[in-house]
Image (cartoon, rainbow, N blue to C red):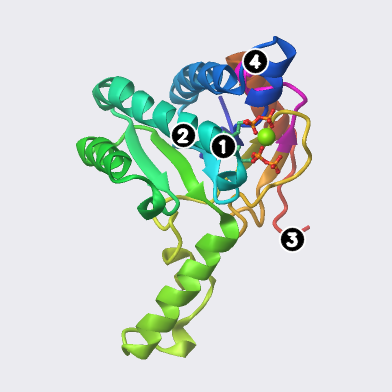
Amino acid sequence: MNNIPRHVAIVMDGNGRWAQKRGLSRSAGHRAGVETIRNVLKTCKKLGIEVLTLFAFSTENWKRPKSEVDGLMALLVEYLKKETKELNESNVRLKIIGDISKLPMHIQQEIHNSTQLTKDNDGIVLNLAINYGGRAEILRAVKKIANDVCLGKISQQQINEELFSKYLYTHDLPDPDLIIRPSGEYRISNFLLYQMAYSELWFSKIMWPDFSSRVLLRAIKDYQKRDRRFGAV
Ligand code: IPE
Ligand code: IPE
Ligand code: MG
């Protein structure tokens, strides 16, 4: 239990291929992926991890067929409706990163309800990345900073790494210590670009619906063997 990462971030990938292999629809794969969230969150809580960030929908995922996008949105609403009460009872703070203003109004409302209800909880933060893109997040921060400079709220000289991170969606979270990508893809796909400067990366061929607590523990064990030097010797 020594050296537990404070913040674990996961790219929930491989639902479609998992389903395809079983002759199921992609949406059945996404549904199975939601089940994985329950197990992984439970294990993170037990380990005392402070933040679990899950990449659920990227700014690029709008390129998918409308039927799949609609299915993913419906699944999100279903998850929030079903789980919020229990998340709240187990002291989870739900947080969303990404541009949710592009989502249908009723989904924004559902997100608002869930985040409001859990906002004062001081247990693990379940941070869902929805319509999130690392580049979009950085540009949003740049625009906000430019605006605050124009308004005279901050001066150009004050802009440094610490200030910049206060303008990101993750302003109230530590940087991810460990980023996990299942599904056998060795890429970041626009996830947490600014925050991942010194994150440890862990890849696995397992598809997200098959990702279990055992796999998570293996990732954490590997993480614990890493020597994080942050540029020093
Ligand atoms: C889920 O996995 C990730 C989301 C974008 C919701 P995918 O739907 O990308 O599954 P694969 O990569 O096609 O197998
Ligand atoms: C990354 O998965 C985004 C999410 C898991 C939400 P993708 O399946 O969209 O990534 P690419 O297209 O393989 O890079
Ligand atoms: Mg994918």
Q: Which residue is mark 1?
A: 5
Q: CA distance from mark 3 to mark 4?
A: 35 Å
Crowd rating for badge 2 (residues with CA inside 10 Å; few <14, some 14–19, many 20+): some
Q: Which residue is mark 3?
A: 231
User: At label 3, which amino acid type do we have?
Assistant: Gly
Q: Which residues are magenta?
A: 202-211
Indicate which label's residue lies in the foreground, 1 or 4: 4
Image quadrant, ligand 3: top right
Q: Is residue 176 left or right of residue 226?
A: left
User: At label 2, which amino acid type do we have?
Assistant: Asp
Q: Which residue is mark 2?
A: 70
User: At label 4, which amino acid type do we have?
Assistant: Asp
The first of marks 2 and 4 along the sequence is 2
Disc marking residue 210: 4
Residue 119, percent across and down? 25, 41
User: At label 1, which amino acid type do we have?
Assistant: Pro
Residue 36 higher or lower than 170, as above or below: above
Residue 164, percent across and down? 49, 70
- Tell me the element at label 2: helix
Residue 61 higher or lower than 26, as above or below: below
Q: Residue at x 46, y 34 (%)?
A: 70
- Tell me the element at label 4: helix
